[in-house]
């Protein structure tokens, strides 16, 4: 079920929230509206946590995770790390990694089985991702863009890619990830998919500007209708 | 062998338009064109209704602030004018412009403009729209001024020649008609001793005077008169007057050259005949056939007046002609290089002549003349009678004081009076050619000497018949009516013509030199061969 919402009048919900199959992290501050939207949808099934990362509200772009674990940038403070560690269930491994490209959410896109990473990510980070998140890692670009985490959004059931991705690339990525992929837009024609959309296997949240056409595309590719 | 890296084949995938859901190629806004058009109007800041001012009198449109442009409907000039008037076009890129047809009397002009502008983030949108112009009547200041004082002129050229006839002006009239120099004239006035020409601008008057300078020798002065003064702009309106004086020397005049001029021309005998007047004055010494052409500036350095002119001619009967040969050759070429190309038509000869009034007497004069090739014994010639004439002139008196002598007679030209009289009696007098005339306003108030004008005109026509070089410079037209008449009569007269038809008949303008008067005939030009066919049919 796809829902439209806004964080403090901004349609870029993917910047301020991170949604996985096991938990949901939401940024602090502003009206409780944003938090309550997520809560009403998700709190019966998964924990919804309010936190900041590295003192900022950009939790969606700085962190990356799936049902197995969560990775945080090296700029995360100890307090935040403690808070997150305490709030999340014990099965989920929380790890702070030392990586030059600290906006992990922009550089890594993952679901529960595989991940696409920025071509310049270190080898050590790649290994950590493999260990902590338990995924197969592929170095790829999306529509000739290196920021794979920003320009695509993938779940276990499907993925939405940058609108300029050509047909051959879509097929290649689809065969790598073993999920159906489609190119589309979000938030009234914006091509930064991951900034405007967060999704997991049964729900998705996107900006208020998203048109019904885009919403129908999202629902169909992530198989959200019951 | 591949020259560069392998480029995999890339096909652009389709996305759905975010608004309407139709399949489109991805673009920076990811909306289909129609959806973009509904969202954005790039023609927003552009004026769609414009007012244009048009002058009904002259058909010109106003280009602000002051310039009036003549343009036809649906013309290029009108299109540029219209596009310039639209406000807000400088922010967008104009790709195409064309007219949409409107009724000519509807006073509306419609233009379809196609513009390109950038919308959203990098998408370029192209859109067409229509701009409507309302045409309003507004008289332009020029027409206003013309209506307020009609026939007002700004520049005037007053052309004068202080001689006793108007033949120069008749000739000028033909030249002006031929070269169309009167295209800018508002009015032409015929006045005692000259003609006035009126123009709308000073430049037109100057152009006209330049033309005159190339055909007659003249000198002029210019003056201006203040008409109005705008104190706010500091602009002054003037009326300009050019006082043009044509040199008072005419063809067939007798001239005594001042001593200086004579000396500078290599002692050209001070008594000379004027043989041609164009922008240069050609003078010939009848004794040794030397001709010199004087430029206008040269003439005005030491101007001289004529000693005797056409009015003082007396008729002589030629008793005997004896050509004088030089160097044993048959034709006398007149010797030096200064002959000005005329020597071929003159031949030096010694003649014995007697005044017509003296017929029966023994008073015979001997003279040298340049008309050796045209005169035969028994001909009548016109010349200046220097034996009995009283000649006045400073140069002449100086010449006589120094001991100069003049011949008794100087012959000027052969007279065809007798032949013309005979032709008139035969009934053949009508000329087969005619000249066009300039429209002139003649001063009716003064006493017009109509007979004098007629005499001048007749003499001018005779001159044209006699002088082929003068004919070359102007246009002569056929007179179809007279020609038709002559053809009718010609067939009857074939029998009677045997005795009078010889080559010493009065000179006529040959048929080949005549031009067709297109206005009289209408559009098509009948050729010479048709004329000949007609002749053959008659006979």
Image (cartoon, coloured by chain):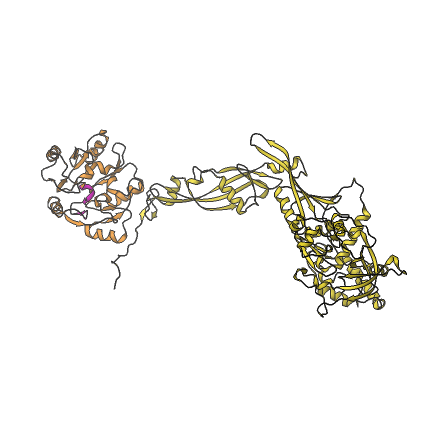
Point out the stretch of residues depicted in magenta: A104-119
Task: Please say whether residue B242 is one of the residues in the magenta stretch.
Answer: no
Task: Please say whether residue A105 is one of the residues in the magenta stretch.
Answer: yes
Could you say which is closer to the camera, residue B215 or residue B132?
B215
Could you say which is closer to the camera, residue B274 or residue B538?
B274
Compared to B364, does B53 lie above or below? Answer: above
- Counting from the top left corner in percent of width and height, residue A28 is at 19, 31
Could you say which is closer to the camera, residue B427 or residue A161?
B427
Relative to B347, is A177 on the left or the right?
left
Q: Quadrant of residue B366?
A: bottom right
Chain B: give its colour. Answer: yellow
Chain A: give its colour. Answer: orange
Q: Given the current orientation, which residue lies at the most extreme right position?
A: B360
Q: Is residue A129 visible?
A: yes
- Counting from the top left corner in percent of width and height, residue B290 is at 70, 60
Q: Given the current orientation, which residue lies at the most extreme front position?
A: B402
Residue at the spot 13% in from the left edge and 48% down from the top edge: A123
Residue at the spot 82% in from the left edge and 52% down from the top edge: B389
- Counting from the top left corner in percent of width and height, residue B342 is at 69, 61
Number of residue marks:
0
């Amino acid at each position: 079920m796809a829902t439209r919402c806004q964080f403090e009048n901004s349609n870029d919900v993917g910047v301020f929230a991170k949604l996985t199959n096991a938990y949901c992290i939401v940024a602090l501050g502003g009206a409780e509206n944003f938090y309550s939207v997520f809560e009403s949808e998700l709190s019966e099934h998964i924990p919804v946590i309010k936190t900041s990362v590295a003192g900022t509200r950009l939790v969606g772009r700085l962190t990356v995770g799936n049902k197995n674990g969560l990775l945080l940038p090296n700029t995360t403070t100890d307090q935040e790390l403690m808070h997150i560690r305490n709030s999340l269930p014990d099965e989920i491994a929380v790890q702070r990694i030392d990586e030059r490209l600290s906006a992990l959410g922009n550089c890594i896109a993952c679901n529960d089985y595989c991940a696409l990473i920025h071509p310049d990510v270190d080898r050590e980070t790649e290994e950590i991702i493999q260990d902590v998140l338990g995924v197969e890692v592929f170095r790829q670009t999306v529509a000739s863009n290196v920021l794979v985490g920003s320009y695509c959004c993938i779940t276990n059931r499907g993925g939405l890619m940058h609108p300029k991705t050509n047909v051959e690339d879509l097929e290649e990525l689809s065969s790598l990830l073993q999920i159906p992929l489609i190119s589309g837009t979000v938030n009234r024609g914006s091509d930064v998919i991951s900034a405007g959309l967060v999704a997991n296997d049964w729900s998705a949240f996107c900006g208020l500007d998203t048109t019904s056409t885009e919403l129908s595309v999202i629902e169909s590719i992530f198989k959200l209708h019951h | 062998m591949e020259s560069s890296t392998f480029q995999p084949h890339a096909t652009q995938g389709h996305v759905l338009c975010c608004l309407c859901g139709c399949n489109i190629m991805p673009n920076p806004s990811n909306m289909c064109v129609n959806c973009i058009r509904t969202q954005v109007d790039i023609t927003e800041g552009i004026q769609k209704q414009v007012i244009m001012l048009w002058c009904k009198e002259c058909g010109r449109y106003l280009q602000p602030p002051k310039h009036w442009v003549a343009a036809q409907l649906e013309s290029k000039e009108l299109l540029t004018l219209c596009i310039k008037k639209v406000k807000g076009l400088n922010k967008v890129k104009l790709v195409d412009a064309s007219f949409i047809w409107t009724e000519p009397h509807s006073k509306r002009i419609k233009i379809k403009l196609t513009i390109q502008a950038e919308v959203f983030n990098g998408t370029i949108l192209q859109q067409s729209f229509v701009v409507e112009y309302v045409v309003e009547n507004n008289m332009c200041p020029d027409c206003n001024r013309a209506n307020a004082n009609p026939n007002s002129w700004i520049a005037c050229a007053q052309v004068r020649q202080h001689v006793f006839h108007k033949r120069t002006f008749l000739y000028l009239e033909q030249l002006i008609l031929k070269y169309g120099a009167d295209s800018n004239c508002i009015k032409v006035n015929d006045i005692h001793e000259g003609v006035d020409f009126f123009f709308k601008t000073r430049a037109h008057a100057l152009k006209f005077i330049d033309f005159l300078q190339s055909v007659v020798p003249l000198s002029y002065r210019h003056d201006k008169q203040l008409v109005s003064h705008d104190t706010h702009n500091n602009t002054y309106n003037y009326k300009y007057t050019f006082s043009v004086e044509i040199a008072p020397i005419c063809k067939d005049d007798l001239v005594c050259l001042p001593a200086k001029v004579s000396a500078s021309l290599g002692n050209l005998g001070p008594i000379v005949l004027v043989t041609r007047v164009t922008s240069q004055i050609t003078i010939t010494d009848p004794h040794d056939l030397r001709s010199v052409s004087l430029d206008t500036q040269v003439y005005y350095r030491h101007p001289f007046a004529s000693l005797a002119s056409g009015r003082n001619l007396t008729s002589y009967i030629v008793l005997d002609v004896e050509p004088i040969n030089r160097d044993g050759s048959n034709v006398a070429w007149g010797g030096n290089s200064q002959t000005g190309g005329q020597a071929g038509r003159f031949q030096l000869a010694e003649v014995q002549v007697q005044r017509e009034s003296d017929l029966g007497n023994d008073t015979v004069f001997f003279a040298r003349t340049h008309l050796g090739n045209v005169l035969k014994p028994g001909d009548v010639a016109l010349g200046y009678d220097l034996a009995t004439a009283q000649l006045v002139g400073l140069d002449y008196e100086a010449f006589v004081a120094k001991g100069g002598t003049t011949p008794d007679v100087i012959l000027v030209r052969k007279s065809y009076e007798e032949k013309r009289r005979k032709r008139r009696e035969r009934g053949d007098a009508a000329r087969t050619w005619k000249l066009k005339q300039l429209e002139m306003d003649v001063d009716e108030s003064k006493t017009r000497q109509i007979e004098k004008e007629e005499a001048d005109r007749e003499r001018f026509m005779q001159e044209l018949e006699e002088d082929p070089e003068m004919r070359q410079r102007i246009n002569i037209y056929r007179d179809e009516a007279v020609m038709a008449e002559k053809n009718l009569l010609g067939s009857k007269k074939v029998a009677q013509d045997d005795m009078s038809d010889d080559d010493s008949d009065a000179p006529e303008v040959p048929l080949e030199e005549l031009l067709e008067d297109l206005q009289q005939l209408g559009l098509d030009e009948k050729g010479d061969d048709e004329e000949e066919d007609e002749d053959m049919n008659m006979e």
